[in-house]
């Protein structure tokens, strides 16, 4: 009985690395979409954005505020298949609207990013132009849903960037 148990345990230990390697890896396109979703949470002024970012592997925190009407956030994370991403988000509250801004910069993006940019441009809720030139792929998009949003993304020799701006009427936001 003990020999059988020992054999089972040793087989499990041998199989564990193989099972871990068998996990599905995300593509750079899927990771770019997930990074944009994180940016959207910050730009929309989601009060749980820092906690959500931390739970998905970002080293995220709220920066010291310069005003009760301005909140800023910073985060960083290795984005699988893309590279190290630095995020900065800013939420400015005005009498009748909230301006949310988020930017993720990957200075030394890995691989080819054409599919990542195309995946962002193909998302429901965005429409616009995508162009590919010799040095990279670029997107200029606007929100098509309820958000008044602007999205610029590019992947070129310099790196990968997501830049999102959302302007939300104050009545549509939660208490700030």
Image: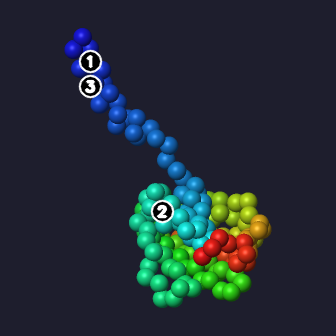
Label 2 and label 1: CA atoms lie apart by 42 Å
Question: How was this image coloured?
Answer: rainbow
Q: Secondary structure at mark 2?
A: helix
Q: Compare marks 2 and 3 and give the one earlier in the sequence.
A: 3
The quarter of the picture where residue 115 lies is bottom right
Residue at horizontal 58 percent and vertical 55 percent from the top: 30
Give the residue number, with chain letter if any, for mark 3: 10
Label 2 and label 3: CA atoms lie apart by 39 Å
Q: Residues within 10 Å of mark 1 (few under 14, many from 20)?
A: few
Residue 176 appears left or right of 58: right
Give the percent coordinates (x, y) of residue 14.
Answer: 30, 30
- Foreground label between 2 and 3: 2
Give the residue number, with chain letter if any, for mark 2: 51
Give the residue number, with chain letter if any, for mark 1: 5
Give the percent coordinates (x, y) of residue 113.
Answer: 57, 63
Residue 142 appears left or right of 2: right
Q: Residues within 10 Å of mark 2 (few under 14, many from 20)?
A: few
Does the image show residue 79? no
For the C terminus, which image quadrant? bottom right
Q: Compare marks 2 and 1 and give the one earlier in the sequence.
A: 1
| Residue farthest toward the top in the current orientation of the protein | 1
Q: Secondary structure at mark 1?
A: helix
Residue at horizontal 50 percent and vertical 43 percent from the top: 24
| Contact, mark 1 vs mark 3 (Cβ under 8 Å) | no
Residue at horizontal 26 percent and vertical 25 percent from the top: 10
- Foreground label between 2 and 1: 2
Does the image show residue 93? yes
Residue at horizontal 26 percent and vertical 14 percent from the top: 4
């Amino acid at each position: 009985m003990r020999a059988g148990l020992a054999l089972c345990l040793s087989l499990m230990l041998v199989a564990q690395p193989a099972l871990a390697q068998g996990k599905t890896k995300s593509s750079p396109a899927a990771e770019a979409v997930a990074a944009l979703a994180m940016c959207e949470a910050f730009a929309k002024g989601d009060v749980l954005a820092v906690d959500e970012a931390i739970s998905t592997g970002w080293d995220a925190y709220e920066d010291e505020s310069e005003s009760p009407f301005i909140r800023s956030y910073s985060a960083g994370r290795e984005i699988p298949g893309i590279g190290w991403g630095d995020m900065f988000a800013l939420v400015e509250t005005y009498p009748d609207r909230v301006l949310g801004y988020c930017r993720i910069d990957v200075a030394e993006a890995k691989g080819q990013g054409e599919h990542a940019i195309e995946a962002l441009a193909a998302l429901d809720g965005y429409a616009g132009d995508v162009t590919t030139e010799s040095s990279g792929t670029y997107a200029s998009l606007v929100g098509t849903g309820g958000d008044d949003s602007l999205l610029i993304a590019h992947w070129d020799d310099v790196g990968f960037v997501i830049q999102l701006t959302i302007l939300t009427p104050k009545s549509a936001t939660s208490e700030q």
